[in-house]
Amino acid sequence: MKSVIEYFKGIYNGIKSLLVGMSVTGGYFIKPGTTLTQQYPDNRDTLVMFERFKGEVVMPHNEKNEHKCTGCGICEINCPNGTIEVISATEVTEEGKKKRIIDKHIYHLGMCTFCGLCVKTCPSQALAFSQEFEHAVFDRTKLTKVLNQPGSKLMKGVE
Amino acid sequence: MEVKEKKVGLENEEYIINMGPQHPSTHGVLRLVVALKGEIVQRVEPHIGYIHRGIEKMCENLTYQQIIHLTDRMDYLSAHINNEAVCLAVENALEIEVPERVKYIRTIMSELTRIQSHQLFWATFGMDLGGLTCFFYGLRDREKILDIFEESCGGRMIVSYNTPGGLMNDIHPNFQNRVKEFLKYFRGVIHEYDDLLTGNVIFQERSKGMGVMTLEQAIAWGLTGPTGRASGFSCDIRKHNPYSAYDKVTFREILYTEGDVFHRYLARMEEMRESMNIIDQLIDNIPEGPYTAKMKPVIKLPEGEYFQSVETARGELGVYIVSDGNKNPFRVKFRSPNFVNLAPLNLMASGSKIADLVAIGGSLDLIIPDIDR
């Protein structure tokens, strides 16, 4: 007799537990205001990433096409996987002194692991992270980028 | 032509199948060679190494700051805690006292990491056992923590937020409000987890009494984390050897004695609640101060051997560094919790049905890149 009661009790509890679970999903089904899905490719215009989001390394230039990179190469030393190559050149200043400037600041996006060490260790804050995250391209060579814009110069007052 | 009668396999012959490396329930590239007799698992042999990247060897050519970003990629669900382990080892070696603020922030971040890891465990474990709904609910809540990480650290899973001596940058001004908002939200919805899965009769039937590890077995095989604590092995590093700000908070170590799949699951569910209590105690009292101690740009550890263990979401992670006084370590060894937790799978699963192997494997909450490193 006892086992019969246990048997029906088991069936009752089992069905009850299923209904409890269904009530959760059913509750959300009749409350469409609680949906969270982002319509991603359609909401590109309104999509705002967080300001610290590590999208890709960029070198900010001001309106006079000047950057802050002195070509010291500290970012290149600190990068764990050889993502950054700094090719420097020498320039003769007005006082006749030789000075090191950057020729090309090459950034291999395909090798970058976004550890943030280059941006953190740069002594003149020449590098920053942009919030760009759509990196997919059809040609791998497009992932190698030159960060200093053509014709750009070192900002005055940055040593 | 006479057709010879084919010999049918003998009744007691074993049938060997490969589960993985591309199997949805192994959560990565783990290959299990399963010997079956009918539907009963005779033995399981894990074959690992499909995602071996040689992280320990790579560390020997990197500076101590650069090692951090590799540890993100071992156990990617406890990335923050892995970072912390290396940082603590380096700081202990240099005998640096990090600011109180750093300790508090690290602890809060670690507990958030633990919550999001267990949320994903809940989501995928439900999916392994046939409850696809869990996956959506788990990821919905995890998204809120990932947003907190993204705002302060700049990354969602691969955070790289710790650095030897402190943090990469200070917490975002919104951080405290967002964490409090999340705690309030999550306390309101965590009952859904129990309604959907814990109480479910099908789930209970499939998980209770499966893959039992006794206390003696758990200690003998070195199980740690929720997997070990479900067998009654008190192994919480946060309790027994507190680091960061864990000595300033009171919390309960979740212990069960049954050691089956269901109690490994329950241990993780309770840990989420305990983690929320820990964050509650710290979030309003973050002391003011610098977010990093003063460090030299090139860190050189004094000659010697250093060890630091921390409690990740899966168990004890040990970092063992041998230094010969250079800027690179001479040898780095990680004692990863997943590798050790995988080892007794044969013991747990042999004798059970093949469908239960999925449940047992899921309850270990394995992260394959941490096994291979």
Image (tube, coloured by chain):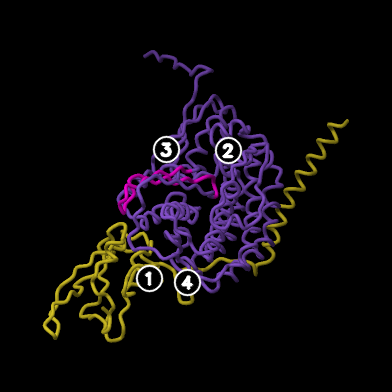
Chain colours: A yellow, B purple
Q: Secondary structure at mark 2?
A: helix
Element marked by disc 1: strand
| Tag of residue A50 | 4
Q: Cα distance, mark 4 to mark 1?
A: 11 Å
Disc 2: which residue: B360
- Residue A129 marker: 1
Residue in the image at 39% along x and 39% along y: B49
Q: Are marks 2 and 4 in contact (CB under 8 Å)?
A: no
Q: Is residue B332 shown in magenta?
A: yes
Compared with B14, A26 (above or below) is below
User: Chain ID for label 1?
Assistant: A
How much space separates mark 1 and mark 2, taking CA atoms? 43 Å
What kind of residue is marked 3? Ile
Q: In the image, residue A115 lies at what x, y percent?
A: 38, 61
Q: What residue is pinned by disc 3?
A: B48
State yes or no: discs 1 and 2 in contact (Cβ < 8 Å).
Answer: no
Residue B168 left/right relative to A78:
right
Q: Is disc 3 in contact with disc 2, using a CB cutoff of under 8 Å?
A: no
- For the point 74% across and 52% down, the residue is A20
Q: Which residues are magenta?
A: B313-336
Q: Residues within 10 Å of mark 3 (few under 14, many from 20)?
A: some
B355 vs A92, nearest the viewer: A92
Circle 4 residues within 10 Å: few <14, some 14–19, many ≥20: some
